[in-house]
């Protein structure tokens, strides 16, 4: 059975449920997603290396946590669920960072991003995630544009650095 996502208007008003398979490949079907940026107590950013079996951007480094909002879920509920599924991490006090959008020929997503400070332990979802690693700001900065990160992460990273929480990354 296909996962049911939350279809929305461009302004994020709920239209109703939509099957996940109808969202990817049809950018007219705008749906909700979440990202969680996990930073450790030293100010390094946790990134996940996408499994080589992923349909999009296999083997590239990406946001700490990313996933879809299931129909009937809030953004925060989805962030909590995805963090638990992907990292084995229970979000204690996620801070809302900002809302953003992805619009490309493959998909259209309205995204809410959250911040969580944690040193772990983490338990990666092996079928989705090849590896986990903390990156310093300098390590991310010198590798931007090299092709090792997903384009979505590079956009997210720029928004995070420009946000009022960007100073936390060292």
Image (spheres, rainbow, N blue to C red):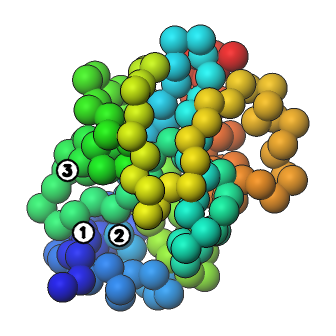
- Residue at 38 percent of width and 58 percent of height: 67
Q: Nearer the viewer, residue 109 or 141?
A: 141
Task: Identify the secondary structure beneath mark 3.
Answer: loop
Q: Is residue 20 left or right of residue 25?
A: left
Task: Identify the secondary structure beneath mark 2.
Answer: strand
Task: Identify the secondary structure beneath mark 1.
Answer: strand
Up the image or down, 43 lies above or below 85; here it is above
* Residue behind mark 3: 74
Residue 141, x across and y down, in percent: 81, 34
- Is residue 97 something one can see in this rendering? no
Say the numbered circle drawn on residue 6: 1
Q: Which one is earlier in the sequence, the residue at label 2 or at label 1?
A: 1
Residue 4, x across and y down, in percent: 21, 75
- Residue at 49 percent of width and 35 percent of height: 37
Discs 2, 1 touching: Cβ within 8 Å: yes
Q: Which one is earlier in the sequence, the residue at label 3 or at label 1?
A: 1
Q: Nearer the viewer, residue 90 or 99?
A: 90
- Structural distance between the alpha carbons of marks 2 and 1: 5 Å
Q: Residues within 10 Å of mark 3 (few under 14, many from 20)?
A: some
- Residue at 24 percent of width and 69 percent of height: 6
Up the image or down, 110 lies above or below 87; here it is below
Residue 102, x across and y down, in percent: 54, 63
Say the numbered circle drawn on residue 31: 2
Residue 151, x across and y down, in percent: 69, 59
Instruction: Classify the position of the N terminus by image quarter.
Output: bottom left
């Amino acid at each position: 059975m296909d996962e049911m996502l939350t279809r929305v208007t461009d302004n994020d008003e709920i239209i109703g449920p939509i099957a996940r398979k109808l969202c990817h490949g049809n950018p007219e079907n705008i749906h909700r997603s979440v990202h969680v940026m996990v930073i450790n107590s030293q100010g390094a950013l946790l990134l996940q290396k996408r499994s080589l079996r992923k349909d999009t951007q296999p083997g590239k480094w990406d946001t700490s946590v990313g996933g879809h909002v299931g129909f009937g879920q809030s953004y925060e509920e989805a962030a909590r669920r995805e963090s638990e599924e992907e990292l084995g991490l229970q979000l204690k006090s996620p801070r809302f960072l900002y809302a953003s959008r992805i619009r490309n020929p493959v998909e259209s997503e309205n995204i809410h991003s959250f911040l969580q400070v944690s040193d772990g332990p983490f338990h990666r979802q092996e079928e989705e995630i090849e590896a986990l690693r903390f990156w310093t700001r300098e390590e991310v900065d010198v590798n931007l544009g090299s092709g090792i990160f997903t384009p979505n992460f590079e956009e997210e990273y720029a928004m995070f650095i420009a946000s009022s929480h960007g100073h936390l990354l060292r």
